[in-house]
């Protein structure tokens, strides 16, 4: 940021932390602060003293070109990317103060979040979800061989308090990131390491605490960093404790009992008792807690290369599976217990960056990562002495090598290699809670173990054809192999092996055209490919109702062919809109349908006779949608932002809706900012999805829905923040002012009712 005296005879500039020395500035003149992304401020020395020399600038709607990384793994101007992108910066993250990273994604107004329990959050993007969208943290993929096709909640393993920004690419990103990036890619970028320009060391620390009334949330976090010329570190710890969630009390007249929790099960002296819930809006069986730790070390060996070693660890308490705890059979609660064991995720990564140009590359990045994941599920039916446990261990090893080469002033080439290997171990047993006896149970995945490998190479080419006209083209070749051994849970002791070996070439072609300073067009064509993983091929699991999902070794890859067109229009510095329309045509789309398993269409599990279903390849399907985003700077202090998203999708063979296609949704915010104070009035809205328009997979779980389907809803919300000085800040929020009861589509738990949140933050 440029800083100069009012007579323009003294100039200076802030450093990377926004700090500038005013030594040498004449006190008789005012100080002017100028940045292209913010409104100019002119202040006298007296005004600066009253502000403790801490000045907050008012952001313009029309900012300088945003730089994104996740579009092609290297820094790229947003104007040159032909795909829809949404970024959340650190200021927005701090202001939003989300409980989890899943909640943070809802602030985009363009990512839909489903929850089966409070300890969860499954992103849905453009009609895709779970293992068809890709999660990255600092560029390292989190997706593994047991990421399921249903709803997936691993995003909560990422601590939002350590994030510097989030970059979301909508639509297929298979060329750059692999076959599971069918619906979109989310790159969660943690705090960058801070080096100094001299031998002097710098120390920064921050702490925060938050309380929320709807679930009695108590969160505390601490982070600190040390930086020198060649060495830097960053450390963060956080802990959150969530009580049972209270939902809204104001319900639709047509659905007066939807979402109520009239009773719950408690075990007393080894016996199950059904207790009356004194407050039907308290969702008993939703409480949990979580611990996060992150450590980074950075080394600068020379001006040409550096290294970064990172350590991420997350664990939770048991997380009750709330939707299953509310399931009834014969007018009685079905389960006494149903919970996930501690969700443990550990990742170590080493990144090496080399920036010395030669004939082959100008820069190269090497990333090595190892992850271990432990997931477990525990369930016991009402008045049953046997508790079933299913435990999964996954080890993931990955290596990425990415190259960048400037071929000429108009052309650039990126290319690279990726190798990933997963080992899955799955076990299960019954424990008699009275006698302690352990007996055999059917495992979730093949009990002989599974190996899953993905190996690929890609290249991406960018060409500035004319000033303002860019072409992007890319291709990726992938080979994905799977081997699972099933020692005969349902096959009378016979061993079965599930084998897959799939190849595919995917490509993309896109163009951006900056017609003038205020108008930009983009157009993109791409192909996508997703090969079945261990969860798709080998899972044995009852999702609810009278259905059991069984293995299908004949399941093949699904392919998509996609088109996207968009326009960005600015009217001066006061109004901007983005409009995007997209279409995906799917061949061999994976959908869950009735399926005969080893000649049988029913299986008996835990005394229940269940209809067998499996993931199968539908003939053809499509997803069609449109997204609109509006931003307006109403005056110096007030601004407006609004989003609206519409999606439709259908299995063309059965003429049934696709499972992860969401209702109409969006949000509108009016924000007021002045110096150290920021306030926002936010309306979040969601359209209706009638029962007849719900996918057949979802109709198998009627306890999640109202009789009419998924009702429309809206909430009114207030947020505010105040920066006391350079150290202390407070954030206040009052969500769901009207205390409406609502449940987002496909969710198994209702959303919070009226919720007051307070966050205190200190930074030095």
Image: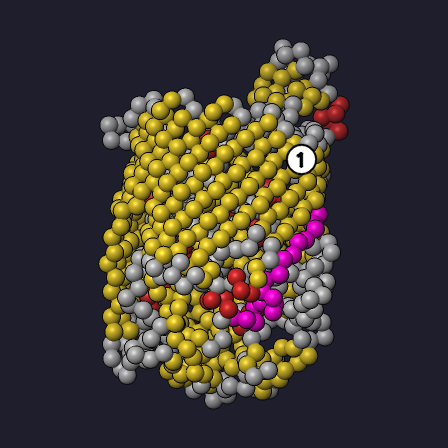
* Residue 252 placement (x, y as % from top left): 70, 63
Query: Which quadrant is the N terminus positioned in?
Result: top right
Q: Is residue 89 at all visible to an observer of this figure?
A: yes
Label 1: how many residues lie within 10 Å, few (<14), some (14-19) or many (20+)?
Answer: many
Q: Determine which residue is flagged by label 1.
A: 639
* Residue 740 placement (x, y as % from top left): 70, 59
Look at the image and give the residue range highlighted in magenta. 701-718
* Residue 184 placement (x, y as % from top left): 43, 48
- From this view, report whether residue 386 is shown above or below residue 658: below
- From this view, report whether residue 7 is shown above or below residue 547: above
Q: Secondary structure at mark 1?
A: strand
Q: Quadrant of residue 95?
A: top right
Residue at point 52% right, 63% down?
694
Q: Is residue 70 at all visible to an observer of this figure?
A: no
Residue at point 44% right, 34% down?
522
Residue at point 34% right, 46% down?
527
Residue 253 falls within the magenta-colored stretch:
no
- From this view, report whether residue 72 is shown above or below residue 598: above
- Horizontal side of residue 144 vs 39, given as left or right: left
């Amino acid at each position: 940021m440029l800083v100069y005296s009012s007579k323009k005879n003294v100039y200076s500039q802030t450093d990377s932390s926004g700090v500038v020395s005013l030594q040498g500035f004449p006190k008789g003149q005012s100080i002017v602060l100028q940045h292209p992304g913010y409104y100019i401020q002119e202040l006298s020395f007296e005004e600066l003293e009253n502000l403790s020399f801490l000045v907050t600038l008012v952001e313009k709607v029309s900012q300088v070109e945003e730089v994104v990384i996740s579009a092609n793994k290297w820094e790229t101007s947003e104007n040159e990317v032909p795909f829809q992108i949404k970024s959340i910066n650190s200021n927005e993250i701090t202001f939003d103060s989300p409980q989890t990273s899943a909640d943070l994604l809802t602030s985009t107004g363009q990512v839909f979040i489903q929850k089966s329990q409070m300890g969860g959050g499954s992103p849905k993007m453009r009609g895709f979800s779970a293992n068809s969208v890709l999660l990255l943290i600092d560029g390292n993929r989190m997706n593994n061989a047991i990421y399921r096709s249903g709803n997936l909640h691993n995003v909560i393993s990422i601590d939002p308090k350590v994030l510097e920004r989030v970059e979301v690419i909508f639509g297929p990103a298979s060329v750059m990131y692999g076959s599971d990036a069918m619906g979109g890619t989310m790159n969660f970028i943690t705090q960058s390491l801070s080096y100094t320009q001299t031998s002097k060391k710098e120390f920064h620390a921050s702490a925060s605490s938050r309380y929320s009334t709807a679930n009695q949330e108590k969160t505390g976090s601490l982070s600190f960093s040390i930086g020198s010329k060649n060495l830097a570190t960053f450390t963060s710890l956080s802990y959150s404790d969530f009580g049972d969630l209270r939902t809204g009390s104001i319900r639709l007249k047509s659905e007066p009992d939807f979402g109520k929790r009239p009773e719950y099960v408690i075990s007393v002296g080894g016996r199950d008792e059904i207790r009356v819930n004194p407050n039907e809006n308290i969702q008993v069986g939703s409480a949990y807690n979580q611990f996060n730790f992150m450590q980074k070390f950075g080394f600068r060996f020379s001006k040409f290369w550096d290294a970064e070693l990172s350590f991420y660890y997350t664990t939770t308490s048991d997380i009750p599976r709330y939707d299953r705890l509310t399931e009834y059979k014969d007018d009685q609660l079905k389960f006494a217990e149903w919970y996930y064991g501690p969700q443990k995720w550990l990742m170590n990564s080493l990144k090496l960056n080399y920036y010395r140009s030669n004939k082959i590359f100008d820069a190269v990045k090497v990333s090595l990562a190892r992850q271990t994941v432990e997931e477990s599920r525990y369930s016991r039916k009402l008045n049953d002495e046997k508790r079933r446990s299913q435990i999964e261990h996954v080890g993931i090893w990955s290596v990425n090598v990415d190259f960048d080469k400037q071929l000429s002033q108009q052309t650039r080439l990126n290319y690279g290699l990726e190798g990933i290997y997963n080992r899955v171990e799955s076990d299960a047993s019954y424990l008699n809670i009275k006698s302690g006896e352990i007996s055999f149970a059917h495992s979730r995945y093949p009990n002989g173990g599974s190996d899953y490998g993905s190996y690929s190479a890609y290249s991406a080419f960018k060409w500035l054809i004319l000033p303002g006209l860019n072409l992007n083209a890319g291709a990726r070749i992938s080979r994905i192999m799977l081997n699972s051994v099933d020692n005969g849970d349902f096959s009378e002791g016979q061993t079965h092996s599930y084998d897959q070996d799939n190849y595919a070439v995917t490509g993309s072609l896109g163009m951006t055209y900056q017609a003038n300073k205020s108008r930009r067009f983009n157009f993109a064509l791409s192909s996508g490919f997703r090969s079945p993983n261990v969860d798709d091929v080998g899972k044995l699991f009852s999702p609810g109702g009278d259905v059991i999902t069984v293995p299908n070794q004949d399941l093949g890859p699904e392919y998509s062919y996609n088109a996207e067109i968009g326009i960005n229009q600015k009217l001066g510095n006061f109004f901007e809109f983005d409009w995007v329309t997209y279409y995906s045509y799917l061949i061999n789309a994976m959908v869950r349908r009735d399926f005969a398993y080893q000649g049988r269409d029913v299986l008996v599990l835990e005394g229940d006779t269940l209809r067998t279903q499996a993931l199968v390849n539908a003939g053809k399907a499509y997803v069609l949608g449109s997204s609109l985003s509006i931003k307006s700077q109403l005056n110096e202090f007030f601004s407006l932002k609004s989003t609206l998203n519409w999606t439709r999708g259908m299995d063309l063979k059965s003429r049934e809706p696709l499972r992860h296609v969401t209702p109409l949704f969006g949000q509108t915010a009016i924000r007021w900012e002045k110096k150290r104070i920021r306030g926002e009035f936010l309306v979040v809205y969601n359209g209706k999805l009638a029962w007849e328009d719900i996918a057949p997979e979802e109709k198998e779980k009627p306890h999640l829905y109202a009789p009419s389907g998924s009702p429309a809803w809206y909430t009114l919300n207030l947020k505010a923040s105040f920066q006391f000085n350079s150290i202390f800040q407070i954030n206040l929020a009052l969500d769901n002012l009207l205390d409406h009861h609502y449940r987002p589509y496909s969710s198994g738990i209702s959303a919070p009712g009226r919720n007051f949140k307070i966050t205190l933050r200190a930074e030095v």
